[in-house]
Amino acid sequence: MTITQRDTDTARALEALEDGHASVRLRAALAVGTAPDPSFVDKLIERCAIEPEFFVREMLTWALTRHPVSLTLPGLLREVRSDRARARSQALHTLSKIGDRQAWPAITRTLLTDADDEVARSAWRAAVVLVAEGEESTLATVLATQLGRGERETQLSLSRALVALGEAIEPALVAATTASDPRMRTHALATQRLLRDPDAGFECAIEEAKRVVALGGTGIEGQ
């Protein structure tokens, strides 16, 4: 069998994706995305699951978006069920960037409530991009169960996801403002503020919500 220049270039690029230097991996991912080739898809997905550097993972995701959805979707859908948190998180992130709603059924309640914050955050972002028409209220109800979870960065991610769903989140937020958990009530009130006023900063919204909760209020008019 004759080894062509293309075969040689492909082999070098695949090898570079595993190089010990992040800068080399970054250039390799850029090259693969610049000249998409179906033979790279599996390797890109595999590398996403283990790549330690954020900026290289972002380039790997970009490279995957440059390939046909028919080639990338099956592998990414397998990865969201992986035992490895990074694999789940990056696959979800990539699905959100691809934006093909065929992936919506894969965004399960299990992923939306994943114990790993990074996986859950990626699932929230993917969900609001991929949600099927008419499923927004159901999604909002599941997302609302996560109100009060984690530190400020995680809470901000959830608020952004909820606000992106628009008016569909209002019933779930109202219910959460009467929850027994003060963290959930506070987060719900802050998210309500952001829904009403998108320009309000999250920190200001949280501080205002804390004052309301401390005074025994719910943020519901008349209460």
Image (tube, rainbow, N blue to C red):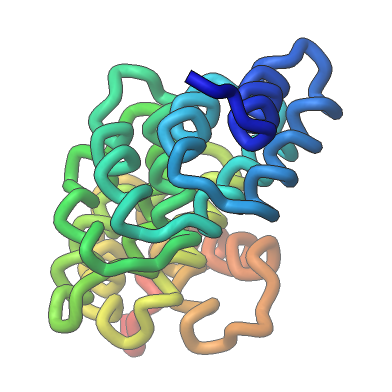
Left or right: 111 with respect to 187?
left
Q: Going 47% across and 69% down the picture, which residue do you hit?
A: 191
Q: Position of residue 123 (x, y in %)?
A: 36, 49
Q: Is residue 15 visible?
A: yes
Q: Residue furthest top?
A: 20
Task: Work out whether 168 lies above or below 7.
Answer: below
Q: Going 28% across and 59% down the picture, which residue do you hit?
A: 144
Q: Is residue 118 visible?
A: no
Q: Position of residue 24 (x, y in %)?
A: 82, 26
Nearer to us in this view, 50 or 109: 50
Rendered image quadrant of residue 129 = bottom left
Quarter placement of the C terminus: bottom left
Nearer to us in this view, 24 or 101: 24
Left or right: 72 with respect to 179?
right
Rendered image quadrant of residue 185 = bottom left
Q: Position of residue 194 (x, y in %)?
A: 54, 77
Q: Position of residue 41 (x, y in %)?
A: 45, 39
Nearer to us in this view, 118 or 41: 41
Q: Going 34% across and 50% down the picture, which residue do you hit?
A: 71
Nearer to us in this view, 29 or 139: 29
Left or right: 88 with respect to 101?
right
Task: Work out whether 152 lies above or below 81.
Answer: below
Task: Work out whether 14 lies above or below 56.
Answer: above
